[in-house]
């Protein structure tokens, strides 16, 4: 059996506040070049930096 709709297939549902949404922004070339040398994605680097710098935590992962 492969493909198609089946029980337990697919990613688990996320709380609406945890769903990712595309955002377009401009960054200096030197910063983009540095981020591209890192193993993490740009999105992960930015998210982790914001969490650490501003001491913020995401909401719980439970679905209401």
Image (cartoon, rainbow, N blue to C red):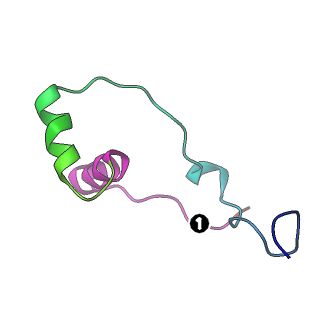
Q: Is residue 19 above or below residue 33?
A: below
**Callout 1 secondary element:** loop
Q: Which residue is found at the position 34% from the left and 50% from the top?
A: 47
Examine the image and state in which quarter residue 10 appears.
bottom right
Tell which of 23 and 59 is nearer to you: 23
Q: Residue at x 55, y 39 (%)?
A: 21
Does the stretch in magenta take in 9? no
List x then y, in percent, for residue 34: 14, 43
For the stretch drawn in magenta, the main secondary structure is helix
Residue 15 position, x and y percent, is 66, 57
Q: Residue furthest left?
A: 30
Residue at point 23%, 27% (across, down): 27
| Quadrant of the drawing holding the C terminus | bottom right
Tell me, yes or no, whether the highlighted magenta stretch contains residue 49. Answer: yes
Q: Which residue is mark 1?
A: 61
Q: Quadrant of residue 32?
A: top left
Residue 60 is situated, as x and y percent measured from the top left of the image, at 56, 65
* Residue 8 falls left or right of residue 63: right
**In the rendered structure, which segment of residues is drawn in magenta?**
42-62
Left/right placement of residue 31 relative to residue 48 reads left
- Above or below, comparing residue 19 to residue 59 in the picture: above
Answer left or right for 64 relative to 19: right
| Badge 1 density bin: few <14, some 14–19, many ≥20, Cα 10 Å | few
Q: How many labels, in total?
A: 1
**Image point (87%, 63%), residue name:** 4
**43 lies above or below 33:** below
Residue with the most extreme top position = 26
Quadrant that contains the N terminus:
bottom right
């Amino acid at each position: 059996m492969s493909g198609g709709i089946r029980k337990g297939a697919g990613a688990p549902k996320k709380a609406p506040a945890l769903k990712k949404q595309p955002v377009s922004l401009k960054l200096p070339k030197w910063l983009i070049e540095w981020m591209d040398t890192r193993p993490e994605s740009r999105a992960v680097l930015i998210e982790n930096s914001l969490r650490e710098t501003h001491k913020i935590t995401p909401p719980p992962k439970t679905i209401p």
